[in-house]
Amino acid sequence: MIDIGKLYCGGSSTGDSLRYGTKAGPDCHGNAPHRMQRSASERRPIVVWSTTRTCNLRCVHCYTDSEARSYEGELTTDEGIKLLDDLASFEVPSVLFSGGEPLMRKDLFRLISHAANKNLRPVISTNGTLIDRDNAKRIKDSGVVYVGISLDGMEDVNDRFRGVEGAFKKAMRGFDNCRAADQRVGLRLTLTERNYRDLHRIFDFIEEEGINRACFYHLVYSGRGGNLFADDLTHAESRDALDIIIERTADFFRRGLDINILTVDNHADGVYLYLKLLEKDPEAAEKVRSLLAWNGGGANSTGVGISNIDFFGNVHPDQFWQDYSFGNVRDRSFGSIWLDESDPLMRGLKHKAEYIKGRCRLCRHRDLCTGAMRVRAFRTFEDFWAPDPQCYLSDEEIGLTGEMIEELRARGEDFPVPAALRG
């Protein structure tokens, strides 16, 4: 995650200790600040548990291709309790209950309460449409520390994106019900061709509705979002989107509004922000660079700081990579699976800087990003270690010379940017 207010505006937020090693306040789950473990083999991941594939919506970009029906073979309640005990023993810092739609699972609150009692800091990722007043109270009472509600634009765009008319209104009622229950809640939006031109209107909406946290996700090719580049922004559009996000966040900050804005799933955003700040305030920019380098970008994301367990107990590098499994928690513990580097992908994910290729390998900002999202590289180039095709930074910005480009060609590491992303 790239915290725009923290990095560009010099503010602080609840995620500082996890993302940047600073002690400005409690972490993103409301816990006391602490320094993140630095070794990939020692660090414990946040676990995204896809608790059920069932969902009441049909989103265009759904990474699990979920539908409103039951699926055979999902982990039972007893297996879920056993899994949470296992994760607690492995000292996982947080469990994100996801889906499908997690609120479609009847035993969800029992599982969440158990996670909270094990100090697993439960978070819910939801479409929000099922959060009535009773569910909002149950969410709060069960120990959930944060609820992320997904929207994908204003009402007309969102409902087409979600595949169900009225989804926007129901999600916003869910948001309001969470706030009424004093439950910490924020919005999650995926940047696509369908909503990016509405960004100013979305920011107006965020302010008007008193929303104090919003995360803008870059599209990851998976599930129904696996049609490569179909809804993705071009590089020029990505830069424009970041300019708008930075501009509007800075405006919030100047006016003293407590609104936390983050971007997710593209570590090039951090480099882009650093380069913009370098033109305006070199001293502040160097401080930002040190924070980004400490975080390491992709070095500490997929396969290190984030993991996924699917409905059936399979362990994946992250929630977007459910076609690659390291093992199943029904057969052995999560910790033994997660620390087993005999799998070549797991080995590479734990040591990304040694494996990344192409322009990522030669990038002067490599320590700030470390190749970003490996799953996007694999989907595009069928190579785990190819450059992330969503890197919109120019050759000049990353210090790539003509000689370097020739070297990449000679080594077979010339990965051309897909025409759809060039625009």
Image (spheres, helix red, strand yellow):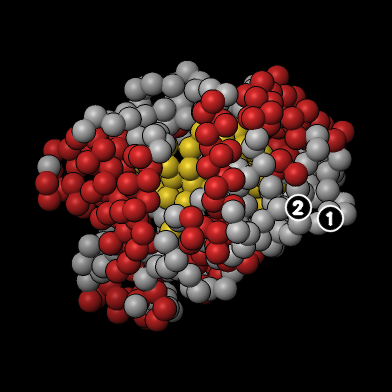
Count of numbered circles in the view? 2
Mark 2 belongs to which amino acid?
Answer: Thr
Q: Position of residue 65 (x, y in %)?
A: 69, 62
Rendered view: 216 above or below 39 = below
Residue at image location 87% in from the left, 33% down from the top: 78
Mark 1 belongs to which amino acid?
Answer: Tyr
Rendered view: 14 above or below 208 = above
Q: 410 or 274: which is nearer to us?
A: 274
Tags 1 and 2 in contact by the CB under 8 Å rule?
yes
Residue at image location 55% in from the left, 47% down from the top: 169
Q: CA distance from mark 1 to mark 2?
A: 7 Å
Task: Specify whether residue 295 is in view.
Answer: no
Secondary structure beneath label 1: loop
Rendered view: 283 above or below 318 = above
Residue at image location 28% in from the left, 31% down from the top: 257
Give left or right: position of 393 versus 82: left
Task: Specify whether residue 178 is in view.
Answer: yes
Give left or right: position of 123 versus 67: left
Q: Position of residue 228 (x, y in %)?
A: 53, 73
Place residue 114 in its image quadrant: top right
Instruction: Say whether disc 1 or disc 2 marks the residue closer to the N-terminus.
Output: 2
Q: 280 or 148: which is nearer to us?
A: 148
Q: Position of residue 350 (x, y in %)?
A: 55, 48
Give left or right: position of 106 versus 381: right
Secondary structure beneath label 2: loop
Residue on which disc 2 sits: 54
Q: 13 or 394: which is nearer to us?
A: 13
Residue on which disc 1 sits: 71
Give left or right: position of 29 versus 101: left
The C terminus: image quadrant: bottom left
